[in-house]
Amino acid sequence: MAKKNSIGTPSLFVGGTILFSLAWMMPSFPLLAFVGFAPFIAIAANNRKEKSMWSSLELVLLGLSISFFAGSLFSFDLLASILAHTILFTLSFLGYTFVRKSLGPGVSIITLSIFWLTIEYILLKWSPLPVTFLADLFFLKPEWTAWNPATGYLGASFWVLITNTFLYQAVLTEKKVNWIFVVLFLFTVIGPLIYSYTIADDLITRDQMTQLYSSSSNETNDYNLNGEFIPRTAAWVSVLIVLFTLVKRKTTKK
């Protein structure tokens, strides 16, 4: 369940835009990847039922656009592509808001992450334009994500989303600091890093992912057989969520 917080939406917008932009601009040490997305999650949680579904989402769209634009080193050649994809990514926030307004405040904030991963998977398979994924935050630090043969390259996108979700639950809700979520946040940041540096001896690169989804490979390694397991699973779950929400809305109106 997502809880509203006492921090104003404009402050969340400014803080999120600055932190997330810096995360993209510091790829050699992208530690801000684990905190910069949380303010945008808080903005979605602040969009309560007394407001329209579109309320505050324009700030999410603007903040994400600025952040991805910063990640391109302010390349105007990529601006149109960035805006198009950011609009699609903002639909994950709209989808979460729609589900929560339909099913009630008990809907988990993790729904937002499921929709985001679904959009990444759709863009991976069908976008004709270059796409920036959250996993690309670590493109200069692949040793941080050497655990990803089991999850796929976009498993790192889920890593960003889940750590930021735990951070939101820990310090950006209307309650005092939730130390359980603080521990979960630290564990989900540090645990995969330790595993990557001490145990893992292989990793999936963006080039491998792109090759798998742009050609028919005859290799039979685990990654080629399973593909991007996490976003693919998120896509199926999101379909179930949307169908259940539509059925619930229809039966409620009767």
Image: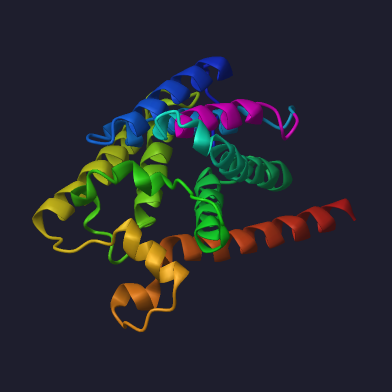
Q: Is residue 60 magenta?
A: yes
Q: Residue at x 23, y 50 (%)?
A: 142
Q: Residue at x 57, y 40 (%)?
A: 86
Please, is residue 227 above or below residue 35 in the view? below
Type of secondary structure dominating the magenta stretch = helix
Coordinates of residue 221 in the picture (x, y in percent): 28, 79
Residue 152 higher or lower than 186, as above or below: below
Residue range of the region highlighted in magenta in the rendering: 52-69
Q: Is residue 55 left or right of residue 31?
A: right
In the current view of this chain or complex, which residue is farthest to the right?
254
Would residue 106 be visible to someone looking at this image?
no
Residue at 83% from the left image edge and 57% from the top image edge: 250
* Residue drawn 75% across the image and 31% down it: 52
In which image quadrant can residue 229 be found? bottom left
Q: Is residue 183 visible?
A: yes
View extreme (left): residue: 198
197 sits to left or right of 23: left
Residue 108 falls left or right of residue 222: right
- Viewer-proximal residue, 181 or 19? 19
The answer to whether residue 107 is above or below residue 242 is above
Where does the image place residue 63, in percent across and percent down from the top left?
53, 27
**Front residue (pair 101, 56):** 56
Q: Is residue 4 magenta?
A: no
The quarter of the displayed image where residue 35 is located = top left
Residue 244: image quadrant is bottom right
Number of numbered callouts drawn = 0
